[in-house]
Image (tube, rainbow, N blue to C red):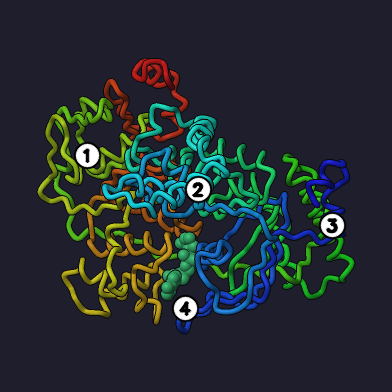
Amino acid sequence: MLRQILKKGINPYICASQIQYHMISVDNLSLKFGKRTLFEEVNLKFTPGNCYGVIGANGAGKSTFLKILSGEMDSTSGAINITPGQRMAVLKQNHFEFDEVDVLKTVLMGHKKLYAIMKEKDDIYLKEDFSEEDGLRASELEAEFAEMDGWNAESDAASLLSGLGISEDIHYTLMKDLAGNQKVRVLLAQALFGNPDILILDEPTNDLDAETIVWLEDFLMDFKNLVIVVSHDRHFLDTVSTHVVDIDFGKVKIYSGNYTFWYESSQLALKQRSDQNKKADEKRKDLQDFIARFSANVAKSRQATARKKMLEKLNVDEIEPSSRKYPGIIFKPEREAGDQIFMTENLELKADGVTYFTDVNLMVDKGDKIAFISKTKQAVNKFFQTIVEEIKPSKGNLKWGVTINKAYLPNDNSEYFQTELNLIDWLRQFSTNQEEAYVRTFLGRMLFTGEETFKKCSVLSGGEKVRCMVSKMMLQNPNLLVMDEPTNHLDLESITAFNNAIIEFNGTVLMSSYDHAFVQSSCNRIIEFTPTGTIDRRMPYDDYLMNPEIKALREKMYGGKV
Ligand SMILES: Nc1ncnc2c1ncn2[C@@H]1O[C@H](COP(=O)(O)OP(=O)(O)OP(=O)(O)O)[C@@H](O)[C@H]1O
Ligand SMILES: [Mg+2]
């Protein structure tokens, strides 16, 4: 119906509200894990054409909510109603799930029914003793396959990939061999394969560089169907979302407008509530001024339409100030490092025709806070794996100082959590002091207290896993930190606490991060790996990026491809 309205050129927002066209309705939903209520009595409606940005602290229940929406998980009570015949596709928070599958197949797997038919068909043809029954089944499957336009599936998937910037030469590469930003593009192609009416994305911006985030923003702005996206990235949310879905206080609520609008209006709500003496019409005026200010700088069309209705919809009494908490991150070196920190000699990693880094002759000084960067996909990630001795270099040596006690935050932490231990026993594995009270201190600083510490670490949310890894790092009392994308999965409060901890830390840091502000505020040295060698400068990140001499050098070292 909405599509017909759109074709006729009538303002869809007015009509949509009159005919109450909702694609998804959530009725009296609640979810409990044992004694803990994640949310209850949730009543929401999602309308086509809108982009809903889902926000909430780490562990608030964002991924769980999306899993219930997509039918992957059952709620404790209540119901989700989706207009029949609407296809939903999901890009999950775990970007490592398809690591052993090649790119093209990953996309095909996005169309579950078609993929199941292909697989069953292939399994039958591989059989050595092909029975009559098998023959019948195979012809049934062939018919279904043809009906679903299966013969064009591979070429459709390939052109979708190429359209999303994944060139043909890597269509048969395994997902684990792709860089983070390429992986997200493939996972997006998987979600888009088969034209979903509802697109659900759980933290797609993790591992994305600034350039790819802009690309994703543009993509979502042009995507006309319903989008529900979780993110901790304020700028991204501001650009793409027409509505905010806030998960807090055990409730899930929708507000019109983007993230900044939600944030500013919740601040205004807080102020108005404390201004007991102001008259109602004065408050109303404040509210109108506020909305006029916001409407004035509407830039994007999706938002412009949504904002027209904001004044009617904004109910200050409904907005609650947030209950977010800051973790207490502090790294205390057990012993001061000596003069020898870390050095490399002619270190090089080449694999499958790619030079990740070459001629790395590094002398790390005490107190250095180094940001490693590269345009070569995965170069920095491979470098960190090399220096923590997880992979072997193809050439050269590396040497750690004897006084160095290093703590490592890997990009992929999944292997640490493939266990059924509870949080206390999990962290105890890494502690010499085995007392529960001692271990609890480190969990408490990362906001795990009371009953929460008895849950199994396998059920942790993405951000909670990173918080556990940070507890582990603090417990080690390191004098050197190696961190590969520390802000991935973390909520804004945790990122701020982490950022401050790195600024305050008086040891040495080797890190990489796509979070510009994090790098700019914590690092005093930049090292860039190019296919022809290394650039190493002692200066803040912004200076490095702006410096004309360095710009020219980068151009030359990448062979003109910057
Ligand atoms: N099976 C389970 N049993 C007990 N608790 C669970 C279970 N599954 C998830 N949880 C808890 O429910 C909470 C919500 O998890 P969820 O993954 O939805 O969080 P999130 O909002 O997506 O967080 P993040 O921003 O870190 O991704 C977490 O505290 C998690 O540990
Ligand atoms: Mg999550």
Tell me which numbered mark, 4 or 2, is placed earlier along the sequence. Answer: 4
Tell me which numbered mark, 3 or 2, is placed earlier along the sequence. Answer: 2
SS under mark 3: helix
The label on residue 33 is 4
Where's residue 499, x and y in %? 42, 52
Classed neighbour count for the residue bearing mark 1: other residues with Cα under 10 Å, few (<14), some (14–19), many (≥20): some
- In the rendered view of the protein, which quadrant contains the C terminus? top left
SS under mark 2: helix
From where the camera sits, is residue 487 visible?
no
Which amino acid type is shown beneath numbered disc 2? Leu
The label on residue 398 is none
Q: Name the residue under label 1.
A: 365
Distance of label 3 from label 4 (alpha carbons): 42 Å
Q: Is residue 139 or residue 12 the one in the foreground?
A: 139
Quarter-of-image position of residue 287 = bottom right
Q: Do the residues labelled 1 and 4 touch (CB within 8 Å)?
A: no
The label on residue 114 is 2
Tell me which numbered mark, 1 or 4, is placed earlier along the sequence. Answer: 4
> Cβ(mark 3) to ligand 1 < 8 Å?
no
Which amino acid type is shown beneath numbered disc 1? Asp
Question: Which residue appears at 32% of the width and 60% of the height?
Answer: 469
Question: Which residue appears at 16% of the width and 50% of the height?
Answer: 404
From the viewer's perspective, is 525 left or right of 360? right
Question: Which residue appears at 19% of the width and 60% of the height?
Answer: 334
> Cβ(mark 4) to ligand 1 < 8 Å?
yes
Quarter-of-image position of residue 244 = bottom right
